[in-house]
Amino acid sequence: MLSVQLTNFVEAGTDEAGRGCLAGPVTAAAVILPPDVVLPLLNDSKKLTEKQRDNLRPLIEQQALAFGVAHVFQDEIDQINILKASIKAMHLALEQLQKTPEYILVDGNKFSSFKGIPHQCIVKGDGKFQNIAAASVLAKTHRDDYMKKISAEFPAYGWEKNKGYPTSTHRAAIQKLGSTSHHRKSFQLLPRQLEMDFD
């Protein structure tokens, strides 16, 4: 059972999805849930099936007091690095909230202060607090929708299934066809043994 809140303040939970991907944006969400919210299936998005996440998303968006979702795309990831891009995406999601939080719960162990609002980083927080778990579900489902959309443009890479993560199918397509405009050029797209020239 996930905890509802850490404090008695108006709390926003924030989390990101897509940090370990080779292609596409890193996506973050921020969510403020009412203290009496009831979402029985809610958990860390990685512990839910795709169908469970898709079913939860409209419930979260309907019941949340406020929520925001933001992408930081591959070109900017390459410029500022994935950690800074992840934190920037969280800040952008928090900026979209129509209700100002008094406290921010962050999944993970790194964050930069947002508008001077007190915050706490919580490792595996998406499995401990409902507002972080809700943010993880929104970040994951919104990012997955985006990756499915761009997969129509580049079907060989299998993004509708792998969502840009480094699966064998994805890497085989990179090896055969090269990278696309959606790939993160600062990432090691292929393991070194696949990049060797045996001529």
Image (cartoon, grey):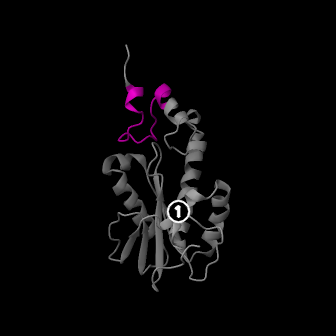
Please state, as top left, top right, bottom left or bottom right, where the C terminus lies in the image. Answer: top left
Residue 31 visible to an observer of this rendering: no
Left or right: 89 as drawn, with respect to 49? left
Q: Nearer the viewer, residue 121 or 184?
A: 121
- SS at mark 1 in the image: helix
10 Å neighbourhood of mark 1: few (<14), some, or many (≥20)?
many
Establish if 127 lies above or below 34.
above
Residue nearer the viewer, 171 or 74 = 171
**In the picture shown, does residue 153 fall above or below 127?**
above
Q: x, y percentage for residue 87?
A: 38, 61
Residue at the spot 64% in from the left edge and 65% down from the top edge: 56
Residue 44 in view here: yes
Residue at the image point whose x is 40% and y is 33% from the top: 191
The residue that label 1 is drawn on is 136
Viewer-side residue, 99 vs 49: 49
Residue 35 position in % (x across, y down): 56, 82
Q: Dividing the image into 4 quarters, which one contains the N terminus?
A: bottom right
Residue 189 within the magenta-colored segment of the rendering: yes
- Which span of residues is magenta-colored? 174-195
